[in-house]
Amino acid sequence: MASGGVSANAWSKLEVETIVADYFAMLASHLAGVHYNKAAHNRALLPRLNQRTKQSIEFKHANISAVLLELGFPYIPGYRPRSNYQQLLAEVVADRLSGARRLHELAAADADLPIVVLEADDILAVLTTAPEAAKHPRETREPQNWTARTTNYLEREARNRSLGLAGEEFVLNYERARLIHADQEKLAAKTKHTSVVRGDHAGYDILSFESHGAERLIEVKTTWSGLTPRSVMRVVGIMGVMNAASARQAIPARTIPRNRCA
C-alpha cells in the first residue's frame, strides 16, 4: 500500500530511479535464468545512494516486489513483498515497467514455460514444509492512481495448463514414493491419476491409500508458492483428503523446487 507522507529521510526521485533500475536488471537476469549476485548489487548501490544502509536497500527491494505484485508482475525470489511503500516508488516502478519491453518479453516467456515434474525417487528428498501464512491482518488497500495497465503475468502463469498437470503428477509420484517408503509396494501400484483416467467429473484428482489400506481421494490445487495466491518461486500441491463419509481433512501444503524444461 502506497504511503503519501514524506519524511525527512524519504528517498529522492533519483535514488528511487537508481534502485528500481538495478532491481529490474536483477529481475531480468532471474527471468532469463542468468546468474546474478544480490549482495554484489547491494554493495554497488551503496555509494550511489544518500548514505543508505544495506538493510534499507533490502527493504526498498522488498517494497519494489510489493509494487510488482500489485501489478501482476513476477518479482525476485528472496525479496518478499513488503507494503507501505512511498507513492513515488509506485509511480517510478509503474512508469519504468510500462517501457520495459525486454522485461515483459521475459515475463511472458517465463509464464508460458511448461513444467517438468520430479521423479518419485527424488521427491521425498525435496519436500519441504509449507510456507507460513502472514500472522498480521491483511491491510486495506486504497485505490491507487499509479497502477499501470499491463498483462497480469501471475494470472497468466496460473492458467498454464501444464502447471496444474505437473502439480497432480507431483502428488501422484509423492504418494507412490510415500507408500513404497512405508513398505506398501502393492498399494503404491494401485494409485491412480484419476483426473486423467476418468476425467475431472470424479471430484478428485488422485486415488491413493493410507499405509493401512484406507483410500485417500486427493484433490490437487497448484500455484506458484509464496505468501500470495500466485507467486513465481515454487510449485505448491495443496491436498484435500476425502474419507468414505466425504468429510474433508486438510493436509498441509508442501512445496517443491521449480523445475522446468528448456
Image (tube, rainbow, N blue to C red):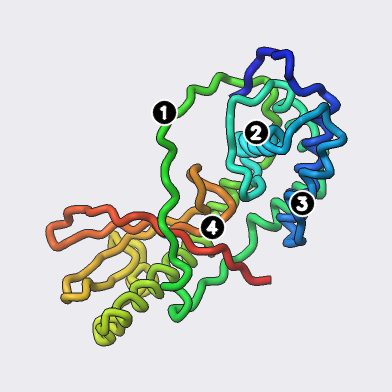
Element under disc 3: helix
Q: Position of residue 103 (x, y in %)?
A: 77, 48
**Viewer can see residue 262:** yes
Q: Mark 2 = which residue?
A: 63
11 is higher (above) or lower (below) than 117: above
Q: Which image quarter is the N terminus in?
A: top right
Q: CA distance from mark 2 to mark 1?
A: 18 Å
Name the residue type under label 4: Arg
Specify whether 129 is left or right of 241: right
The quadrant holding residue 178 is bottom left
Q: Position of residue 116 (x, y in %)?
A: 56, 71
Sequence-first tag of 3 and 1: 3
Element under disc 2: helix
Q: CA distance from mark 4 to mark 3?
A: 18 Å
Specify the farthest residue to the bottom: 186
Label of residue 234 in the image: 4
